[in-house]
Amino acid sequence: MDDLDGALVIGLLALNAIAEAKSFGRAASRLGKTQPAVSRSIQRLEDRLSAKLVHRTSRHVEVTDAGHALLSTVLPLLQGIEDATAAASCQASAVSGTLRVACDARFASLVLAPELAQFLKGHPSLELRLETRNGLSDLVSDGFDLAVRFGPPSISTLVCRRLYSPRVLTVAAPSYLAHRGRPSSPQDLVDDGHECIMAIDPATGRPFEWEFWRGDEKVKVAVRGNLTVTDAGIKIGACLAGHGIAQVIDIGVDSHLRAGTLEPVLPDWADETFPLYVYYPSRTHVPAKVRAFIDFVVGMMPVLQPAGQAGLRT
């Protein structure tokens, strides 16, 4: 809507208020404007339509026949505008409607899935549509309200908020370590011919390179393995079965580490992190349903590491 059409709507709203209030002052109060502002709106409307819409005297204000005829035509439209505005305001402030979330598959299955019932129970008027996607295209044109994904931020047109910086752990099942031995350095993974379970990087379509971080020291190792996967659940399952050594993030594997079904490998080389981010279209006028989901996810995360201590897996 251009400035002229905006002035037309404002003038029509002012004319309707005058017809009901019989006074510029009372009309201004009803509209939350000053009396001179209402008077200017009527004058601009009359100039645009080249018609006298209001008779002004020292004692009375009356809408003319032309004004009443105009209002009888546009009142249903004005009411529709008011209803639509009220509905939009209600939708923005209420956790309701449909929320579409594009989510990293690992995070969705390992972390979100067990907690979603609690979130939906707290917001019974909300319908959640969660789609697992490892990449981001155009969030808005694809119809999503927000996205959650791992890796360094790369979508400059979206608001990006870091949720957590999980560590990258190297793990194996006790049965594998008993059979193949425990490496004592990153290079042992190659020199001793260890079977390493590879994972595809969605950003490149190639297997992730294995890195080991210890403070400021970083080592890349060209590991090998005959199993490459795209799903974190499959990787963890194969690792639990004793097929090989895997690199995993430290969310979603706590129970296995506590139970001893997975054991840390090279724990002194576990300072690499792989940050988790949430993306959404705008910082202003964030719908309540989007804020509620972000708050829910933030509440699930351990305390964030200070930004200066967080590394990025690239």
Image (cartoon, rainbow, N blue to C red):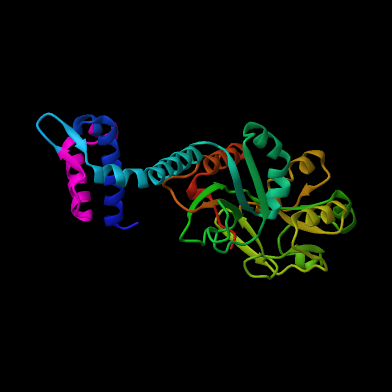
Picture quadrant of residue 187: bottom right
| Residue 274 visible to an observer of this rendering | no
Q: Residue 179 location in percent, x, y?
A: 90, 56
Name the residue rendered at 60%, 46% in the picture.
99
Q: Say if the magenta span includes residue 46.
A: yes
Q: Main secondary structure of the magenta part?
A: helix
Tell me: 244 left or right of 170.
Answer: right
Q: How many marks?
A: 0
Of residue 185 and residue 42, the one placed in the foreground of this image is: 42
In the orientation shown, which residue stands out farthest toward the left?
58
* Quadrant in which the N terminus appears: bottom left
Tell me: 303 left or right of 81.
Answer: right
Picture quadrant of residue 117: top right
Q: Is residue 197 above or below residue 167?
A: below
Q: Residue 78 location in percent, x, y?
A: 38, 44
Q: Residue 265 location in percent, x, y?
A: 75, 52
Q: Say if the magenta span includes residue 147.
A: no
| Residue 160 visible to an observer of this rendering | yes
Picture quadrant of residue 104: bottom right
User: What's the magenta region?
Assistant: 28-55
Of residue 95 and residue 152, the one placed in the foreground of this image is: 95
* Quadrant in which the C terminus appears: bottom right
